[in-house]
Amino acid sequence: MRTRTIVTTLVVGALIAAPVIASAQQSGKRNGAEAQQRAQVERVQRDLDRDRFQDRDRDRVTEPEQDRDRIQDRTNAPDEAKQAEERIYGHELMTDAERLAYQERLRNASTEQEREQIMAQHREEIQVRARNRNVQIDEAGNPVPED
């Protein structure tokens, strides 16, 4: 009888312990899956942070280059504008407004032939203007100093 009580107690204990053990194993699996998921989220976050830092560093490198280019453009702009004016035939015999209007007409010309026609007409007008002012001009349209 004593053996029977011991065996019965062991069987009942096993039946009670089985669901607890199964639950603990499932809980362990869940904890393992959650740990893997947390690790994956952390890896993705690290990658995003790394990319963000790389972008920031790349922006810091290009900003000084862009600043240098902007400064260079601003300092060269007056020289380039002056050179563009000097390429206009008879520019010294024209007012600022006339130069701007002439440049605008050339920009708005739709064909090269139209541009050439505008330039030829301009050349004739400047030669007439020079004669009316008793000014001699060279081939480039610049006034020739009197000796």
Image (cartoon, helix red, strand yellow):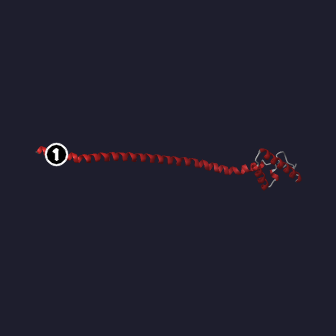
Circle 1 SS class = helix
What residue is shown at x 69% (from left), y 49% (from top)?
76
What residue is shown at x 41% (from left), y 45% (from top)?
40
Please state if 41 lies on the left or on the right of 100 as rendered. Answer: left
Please state if 99 lies on the left or on the right of 44 as rendered. Answer: right
Q: Tally the marks.
A: 1
Q: Mark 1 points at which residue?
A: 8
Q: Position of residue 52 (x, y in %)?
A: 50, 48
Q: In which quarter of the image is residue 43?
A: top left
Return the residue nearer the eye: 78 or 3. Answer: 3
Return the residue nearer the eye: 87 or 145. Answer: 87
What residue is shown at x 20% (from left), y 47% (from top)?
13
Q: Count residues near mark 1 (Cα–Cα under 10 Å), then give few for <14, some for 14-19, many for 20+.
A: few
Q: Where is residue 39 in the image (x, y as percent from the top left)?
A: 40, 46
Q: In which quarter of the image is the N terminus?
A: top left
What residue is shown at x 70% (from left), y 51% (from top)?
77
Q: Where is residue 103 in the image (x, y as percent from the top left)?
A: 76, 51
Please state if 48 lies on the left or on the right of 77 as rendered. Answer: left
Q: Position of residue 2 (x, y in %)?
A: 11, 45
**What amino acid is at disc 1?**
Thr
